[in-house]
Image (cartoon, rainbow, N blue to C red):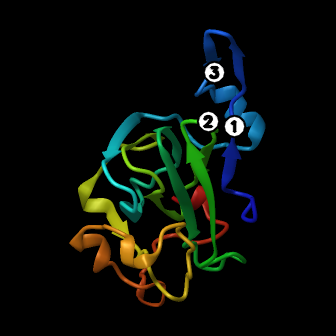
């Protein structure tokens, strides 16, 4: 990926005439890929019924910052991580990947990044693991359609469905980010 801390991981699938089998999570494989974060403590499952549903850009502030390992198990999404670490050489830059039930790819978004995805098909389900528990008092957002970010979501902006909270999130220029590049894993 263009930002080395964000990892695109595609677990091996072993298949035959019956279908396939895959280890979707193995801590040692993540460590071999370069992940040195903590243990995952919570799994989340989201379903979106229509194409163009956008969830994000979200993050949790320290001390509840989260690494996220995201995969799509039904349909397809465009998954994005935006660097929000002050002083980072990639501050304000984003990387994204298509995650689908067919390709089995997963995106690991580390602490210090805002995360979002947009559904590319109807009837999508996304599963993700996080390294800290959900803490509503630590929630943070970044506006999904900030022109300074210029994220290419794979769906025209006029066809995106989001909620009022995400639509009113701050722009990058107004974001009071709690993350600093080079700090101990940004937490």
Crowdedness of circle 1 by 10 Å Cα count: few (<14), some, many (20+)? some
Can you identify the residue that label 1 sits on?
Answer: 10
Q: Nearer the viewer, mark 1 or mark 2?
A: 2
Crowdedness of circle 2 by 10 Å Cα count: few (<14), some, many (20+)? some
Residues at circles 1 and 2 in contact by the CB criterion of under 8 Å:
yes
Circle 2: element type: loop
- The Cα atoms of the two marked residues, 1 and 2, are separated by 6 Å
Q: Residue at x 39, y 57 (%)?
A: 51
Q: Residue at x 50, y 52 (%)?
A: 77
Can you identify the residue that label 2 sits on?
Answer: 104
Circle 1: element type: loop
> x, y (%) of residue 155?
48, 68
Going from the N terminus, do you reach mark 3 or mark 1 first?
1
> x, y (%) of residue 9?
69, 41
> x, y (%) of residue 70?
52, 44
Residues at circles 2 and 3 in contact by the CB criterion of under 8 Å:
yes
Q: Residue at x 63, y 77 (%)?
A: 91
- The Cα atoms of the two marked residues, 2 and 3, are separated by 9 Å
129 or 64, which lies in front?
129
Q: Residue at x 54, y 36 (%)?
A: 101
Circle 3: element type: strand
Can you identify the residue that label 3 sits on?
Answer: 22
């Amino acid at each position: 990926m263009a930002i080395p801390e964000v990892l695109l991981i595609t677990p091996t699938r072993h298949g035959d005439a019956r279908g396939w089998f895959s280890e979707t999570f193995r801590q040692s494989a993540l460590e071999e890929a370069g992940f040195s974060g903590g243990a995952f403590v919570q799994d989340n499952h989201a379903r979106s019924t229509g194409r163009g549903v956008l969830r994000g850009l979200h993050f949790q502030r320290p001390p509840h910052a989260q690494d996220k390992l995201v995969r799509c198990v039904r349909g397809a999404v465009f998954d994005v991580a935006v660097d929000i670490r002050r002083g980072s050489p990639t501050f304000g830059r984003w990387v994204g990947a298509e995650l689908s039930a067919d390709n089995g790819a997963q995106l690991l978004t580390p602490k210090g990044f805002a995360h979002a995805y947009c559904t590319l098909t109807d009837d999508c389900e996304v599963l993700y693991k996080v390294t800290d528990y959900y803490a509503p008092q630590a929630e943070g957002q970044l506006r999904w359609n900030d022109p300074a970010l210029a994220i290419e979501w794979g769906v025209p902006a006029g066809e995106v469905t989001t909620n009022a909270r995400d639509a009113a999130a701050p722009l990058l220029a107004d974001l009071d980010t709690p993350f600093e590049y080079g700090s101990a894993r940004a937490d």
